[in-house]
Image: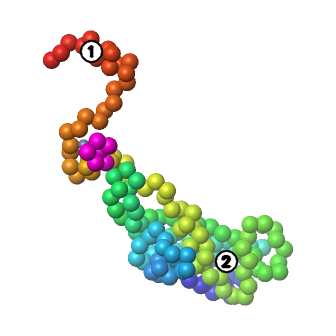
Amino acid sequence: MKINIAQLRQAIGASQSFSFHTPVEDLAGETGELWLKGRIEVTGEAVNTGRLLAISGVIKGVAGQTCHRCLADFTSEAVITFSENFREEGSAATDPDALVYHGDEIDLAEIVREALIVAEPLKALCGEDCRGLCPTCGVNRNETPCTCVTTSIDPRLAALEKLLPKK
Ligand SMILES: [Zn+2]
Ligand SMILES: [Zn+2]
């Protein structure tokens, strides 16, 4: 996932777009699995701002996740943005967070990998309206409606409920 910046370095204000398609396994490396599956698409732009090269882009892929409410596996579209500034090795560090490049190439693999790790959702939900597992009988209530009474009534209201006329 390398971009050649030989031209870009020459002209302040110039920009250069990039686009990669790669299997996500190629990014995971020795650290194991990433939460996206299959191939990912990385597109973006590098801009020469004078002292720095500003690189920003979008990672698109398919996430393979487990719903924390119903424990079902599901996939969803993932779109993650990233941006980093780079300065040439040996140049003045005007931006303390800027990464360093040397020569005419910048390898995006590491910043894309970092962006993916940071963006991993901790509590994935298969849907906003996921009904989860029944705490009483354990069925997945998205698939099987059960008749367990799981609504807990506030004890103060329960006292009132006794006063209501029985149907
Ligand atoms: Zn769910
Ligand atoms: Zn149940």
State whether the magenta stretch is mostly helix, strand or loop. loop
Query: Disc 1, ligand 2: is the CB inside 8 Å?
Result: no
Could you tell me which secondary element the residue under label 1 belongs to?
Answer: loop
Q: In which quadrant of the rendered view does residue 31 lie?
A: bottom right
Quadrant of the image containing the N terminus: bottom right
Q: Identify the mark nearer the N-term, 2 or 1.
A: 2
> Where does the image place residue 41, in percent across and percent down from the top left?
46, 75
Could you tell me which secondary element the residue under label 2 belongs to?
Answer: loop
Q: What label does residue 39 carry, if any?
A: none
Quadrant of the image containing the C terminus: top left
> Where does the image place residue 117, in percent across and percent down from the top left?
55, 66
Above or below residue 159? Residue 117 is below
In front of the other: 11 or 33:
33
Cα separation, mark 2 vs mark 1, equals 76 Å
> Where does the image place residue 72, in percent across and percent down from the top left?
33, 58
Amino acid at the residue labelled 2: Ala
Task: Give the foreground label among 2 and 1.
Answer: 1
- Asked if residue 26 lies left or right of residue 128, the reply is right
- Asked if residue 78 lies left or right of residue 49, the reply is left
Write the residue at 72% across / 88% down.
Answer: 103
Q: Is residue 81 magenta?
A: no
* Residue 128 in view, yes or no: yes
* Residue 21 in view, yes or no: no
Q: Do the residues labelled 2 and 1 touch (CB within 8 Å)?
A: no
* Residue interval drawn in magenta: 133-138
**Residue receiving disc 2:** 14
Write the residue at 47% across / 79% down.
Answer: 25
Q: In which quadrant of the rendered view does residue 126 lie?
A: bottom left
> Where does the image place residue 142, in percent across and percent down from the top left?
26, 50
Amino acid at the residue labelled 1: Lys
Write the residue at 46% across / 68% down.
Answer: 35
Q: What label does residue 162 carry, if any?
A: 1
